[in-house]
Image (cartoon, rainbow, N blue to C red):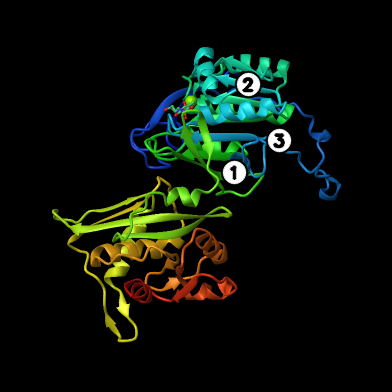
Amino acid sequence: MANKKVSVFFCQECGNETSKWAGKCPSCGAWNSLVEEVIDKTSVKSRAKVSDVKPTKIIDVTASNEQRISTNIEEFNRVLGGGIVPGSMVLVGGDPGIGKSTLLLQTCQKLCLSGVNVMYVSGEESLQQIKIRADRIGKFNDKLDLLCETNLDTIKAVVEREMPTVLIIDSIQTMFNESVGSAPGSVSQVRESTSVLMEIAKGKGIAVFIVGHVTKEGTVAGPRVLEHMVDTVLYFEGDRHASYRILRGVKNRFGSTNEIGVFEMRDTGLEQVKNPSAVMLDGRPENATGSIVTCSMEGTRPILVEIQSLVSKTAFEIPRRMATGCDYNRVNLLVAVLERMRDAKANRSCGIFLGRSDVYVNIAGGIRINEPAIDLAIALAIYSSEKDIPVDEGTIVFGEIGLSGEVRSVSMAEQRVNEAKKLGFKRVIMPMSNIHSVKNIDGIIVVGVSNIKEAVDAISR
Ligand code: TYD
Ligand code: MG
């Protein structure tokens, strides 16, 4: 076994490895992100005798219906796909201070109260700090062990001795292996630490939660590497200044992705929000122009959100466009569609001119939505602000908009309409092509539109 230490460069944004330094990462194009690390390229001889390895026939594999451990936090269970899978590895990412440690400590509390052995390893806080936080959250019992440690060899030894059912590592960026030369938090350390934890998870059947910090670009540091290795990736997001937090599943080998859990940060920790639509619409202005409610599907759950837009005369050479909570490029596209709007019946153009106006779009409540089904609401909010027409408060709108101004069908229209009805909305403007799927719902007026002009007419009435 030759001992071969070599110097390589890792991109801190995407984890790409190169042998030479460059100003720009050849993989993701980030500037000044390559950092030198010394890694051990010692070749490891395969331990298994090749002749011993045999594939298994799929019909011989018995899939034991995996036993899930409930976290007793319904919102968290939902995002995990029904509970914690033993031996799985879950990454919880998020901005500093968003509440990752709080969420996991609360999970520890619920788990230990239901008799599950949990070990919480912190590399960031002292025992006293954890205790202070724990006191705010509530009562604990002796099923929870705390360990303040950053050396993974030590952690591994302790875990193998104590054999908890659930292990929590807060955070992966503070952990280090003596065998890796570089500093904690560097790509090779994070990668190595994750693989050691992976061994613990898969080898011993211990469910491992790891906390990962997010870079300014919004991905977990040493990101791609981590996301590939773990079974489930959850992001904890929300406006740090607002109290609502959203836990979003972006990858899940044991359940559907895009599920979200909604929480509110209180002084006693995180509280579950059972009716997120009501929360998102809380404080909605009455009879205001540029405000419109839409329904977005977050995983299997419909959520109503308010889209706000403000159009004002620009003071700049090039007008400003701003999007908070939705895709900036999508807003630009919708502005262009509004400008080129056509009245098909009269066969003439009826676009609105926004070339000398600043356009701001905001999704209230600090939630981020990437679903194209909110297109129509964004476009109508802009129109409503520009024309100074308030949209009736009892109306909700959804639909995707195509480049020629057509309103295209969206998935799960029925759930969206039902959610709107549940929250007391009286009218829904939606794609004509989806109408057939909602014809059994009564108690709400359904207006089908096939292009943006018809939608504009529907709100102007
Ligand atoms: P924390 O879990 O430490 O964030 P992270 O681990 O993601 O960095 O969250 C800390 C924030 O939450 C901090 O600003 C204080 C606030 N907080 C409460 O408002 N109430 C509470 O009961 C707790 C424990 C924290
Ligand atoms: Mg923390």
Residue 95 can be seen, yes or no: yes
Q: Which badge, 2 or 1, comes first in the chain's sequence?
A: 1
Tell me the residue that label 3 is attached to.
Answer: 69
Is ligand 1 less than 8 Å from the beta carbon at label 2? Answer: no
Q: For the point 73% across and 30% down, which residue is it? A: 205
Tell me the residue that label 2 is attached to.
Answer: 140
Against 39, residue 382 (above or below) is below
Residue 60: x %, y % from top left: 86, 46
Q: Residues within 10 Å of mark 1 (few under 14, many from 20)?
A: many
Mark 3 secondary-structure assignment: loop
Amino acid marked by disc 1: Val
Disc 1/disc 3 C-alpha distance (Å): 13 Å
Q: In the displayed structure, does residue 332 sit left or right of residue 113?
A: left
Label placed on residue 79: 1
Amino acid marked by disc 3: Ile
Return the residue nearer the eye: 216 or 68: 68
Q: Which badge, 3 or 2, comes first in the chain's sequence?
A: 3
Mark whose residue sits in front, 2 or 1: 2
Disc 3/disc 2 C-alpha distance (Å): 18 Å
Q: Which badge, 1 or 3, comes first in the chain's sequence?
A: 3
Q: Quadrant of residue 227?
A: top right
Amino acid marked by disc 2: Phe
Against 129, residue 381 (above or below) is below
Label placed on residue 106: none
Residue 168: x %, y % from top left: 60, 26
Looking at the rendering, in which quadrant would you find the N terminus? Answer: top right
